């Protein structure tokens, strides 16, 4: 194919290169070379039109040159390199985002777990601390369940038993359970499982039912979302007025419907 100008010749060459991101660099490099040749001819007194003809003739057939350049610029290697650069950027941004969101919990009750130095190692399953007015046990329950694509676990739970008799000379003992509920998902863009927080109910070994909304009188379970990682969400849940005779308490994420078989049990005794 004959080219009438330098720009025509360059466009024909670049159209043969399948890896589009390389075309701009090839165009610029060849254009610089041809302009240098043009300057040389002009210094020798050759007219502008004749200089163009000489340069185009020296550069050869644009289609052949383009084909040779395309063979040296493999499209699949070029696209792979191009995609890898974007993947590195995306992964880096996701890591930064996960670090900023996963290591700065907006916690409501997390302080109960941050002071682990106050617990005395009791055995491999939990730690225990006692005083005249209260005792605390830190659990690491071994329970897992699945709900709507999320894997649910309880990384830790803390049972605080208060001896109100030692405080107010009353023969009353009350207990409160604090726990972290984690919802993991294999997709980092999975929706925030807010329903898990508002629909979770519980029942204990004594048959007591704990509703999913705060009630200062009747047993209930409530809390707040506290942490967002790349593949997980965490909630700190709070269950006051636990029956001190209960040997276990069982969470029912997603509600207490008969069709809901999801169970997470914390062994208290």
Image (spheres, rainbow, N blue to C red):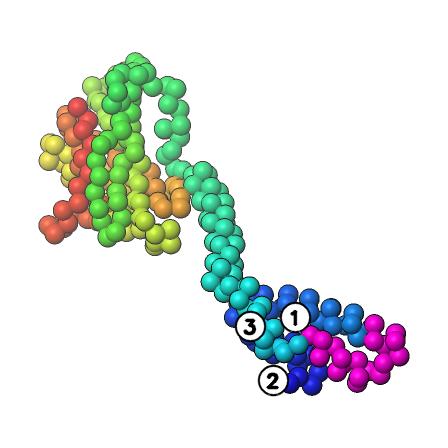
> Residue tagged by mark 1?
27
Magenta region: 40-59
Task: Report which quarter residue 145 is drawn in.
Answer: top left
Q: Nearer the viewer, residue 16 or 123?
A: 16
Q: Secondary structure at mark 2?
A: loop
Q: Is residue 212 above or below residue 109?
A: below
Spot occupied by residue 63 in the image (x, y as percentages of width and height): 58, 78
Mark 1 Cα-neighbour bin, 10 Å: few <14, some 14–19, many ≥20:
some
Between the C-alphas of marks 3 and 1, the distance is 14 Å
Residue sitting at the far top: 132
Q: Residue at x 24, y 31 (%)?
A: 141
Mark 3 Cα-neighbour bin, 10 Å: few <14, some 14–19, many ≥20:
some
Label of residue 67 in the image: 3
> Residue tagged by mark 2?
1
Q: State the predominant SS element of the stretch in magenta.
A: helix
- Marks 2 and 1, the one that precedes in the sequence: 2
């Amino acid at each position: 194919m004959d080219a009438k100008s330098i720009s025509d010749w360059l466009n024909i060459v670049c159209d043969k290169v399948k890896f589009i991101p390389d075309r701009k660099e090839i165009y610029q490099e060849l254009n610089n070379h041809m302009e240098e040749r043009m300057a040389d001819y002009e210094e020798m007194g050759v007219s502008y039109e004749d200089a163009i003809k000489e340069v185009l003739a020296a550069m050869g057939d644009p289609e052949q040159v383009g084909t040779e350049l395309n063979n040296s610029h493999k499209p699949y290697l070029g696209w792979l390199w191009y995609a890898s650069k974007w993947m590195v950027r995306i992964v880096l941004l996701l890591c930064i985002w996960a670090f900023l969101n996963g290591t700065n919990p907006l916690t409501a009750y997390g302080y109960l777990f941050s002071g682990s130095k106050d617990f005395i190692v009791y055995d491999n399953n939990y730690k225990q601390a006692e005083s005249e007015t209260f005792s605390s046990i830190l659990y690491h329950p071994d329970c897992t369940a699945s709900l709507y694509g999320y894997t649910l676990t309880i990384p830790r739970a803390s049972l605080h038993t208060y001896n109100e008799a030692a405080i107010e000379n009353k023969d009353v003992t009350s207990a409160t359970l604090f726990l972290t509920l984690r919802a993991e998902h294999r997709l980092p863009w999975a929706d925030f499982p807010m329903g898990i927080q508002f629909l979770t109910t519980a029942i204990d070994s004594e048959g007591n039912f704990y509703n999913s909304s705060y009630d200062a009188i009747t047993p209930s379970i409530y809390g707040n979302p506290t942490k967002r990682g790349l593949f997980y969400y965490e909630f700190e849940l709070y269950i006051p007025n636990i029956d001190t005779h209960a040997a276990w308490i069982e969470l029912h994420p997603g509600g207490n419907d008969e069709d809901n078989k999801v169970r997470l049990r914390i062994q208290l005794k």
